[in-house]
Image (spheres, rainbow, N blue to C red):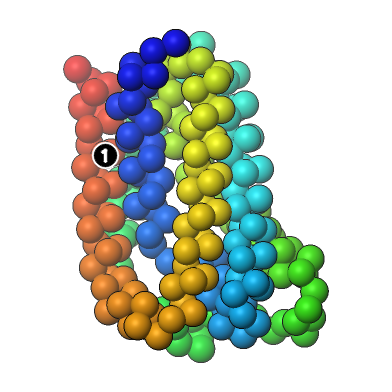
Amino acid sequence: MNIEFYFADFLTLALAHFVALLSPGVDFFIIVSNSSKYGKLSGVITSFGVASANLVYILLALFGIALIKDNTILFTCIKVVGAMYLLYIGYLLLNANKRDIFSSHSTTNINLDKKSDSFYHFSMGFLSAILNPKNSIFYFTMFTISIQNDTSFVVQSFYAVWMFLAVLFWDIFIVYLVSHKNSKKFMQKYSNKIEKISGIILIFISSMIVVNLIY
């Protein structure tokens, strides 16, 4: 198996996935809330919950794509829809308004009574991610744009592991960032600019997918 053959597909997947992670969502605010209220350990446990739920959707997307990738017409149509979905996300990020991501109202008013209950904090992260239908659409899109008809299951599994670890380590990184005052100031100052840059990158990736399908 020639790994270099799949490098372009992997690079597209990894870049699109990472820039999507940069945009603060519900999971981000739950992690920030738990980290701020109960410390780093709570934030890390919540991050594992979020990553585990993402893994469920990643596996569902992986096996779903495996079932349909031999149907060339259907697979191409789904690639086009996936590209349009990335374009939509990019548009939303590009037009996102500046907000206070660490304000009290941004933490979704979570009330936690079980400060020492690790399972409870894990469940908070897991349920936040598993109940978000956008995650299932996003991962299905990711696999659609990065997997070709001849992509082996081993390579697809590598993609899945990569995305799971990317979510986990990014969320843990957020936990440690919000634990430091200077890091929080930096995130607050540049978060909107990061969202807009991420939007531009996703729009570019979406456009290149469509161009490659046409030509």
Image quadrant assignment for residue 40: bottom right
Q: How crowded is mark 1: few (under 14 residues within 10 Å), some or many (20 or more)?
A: many
Q: Tell me the residue at 62%/26% (across/down).
A: 63
Q: Position of residue 69 (x, y in %)?
A: 50, 17
Residue 23 visible in rendering: yes
Q: Tell me the residue at 38%/31% (across/down).
A: 10
Q: Where is residue 24 in the image (x, y as percent from the top left)?
A: 43, 66
What type is the residue that disc 1 sits on?
Ile
The one of 24 and 83 positioned closer to us in this rendering = 24
Q: Tell me the residue at 59%/48% (across/down).
A: 54
Image quadrant assignment for residue 191: bottom left
Residue 95 visible in rendering: no
- Furthest toward the bottom, the residue is 104
Q: Mark 1 points at which residue?
A: 205
Screen quadrant of the N terminus: top left
The one of 150 and 174 positioned closer to us in this rendering = 174
Q: Where is residue 52 in the image (x, y as percent from the top left)?
A: 66, 50
Q: Is mark 1 on a helix, strand or loop?
A: helix
Screen quadrant of the C terminus: top left
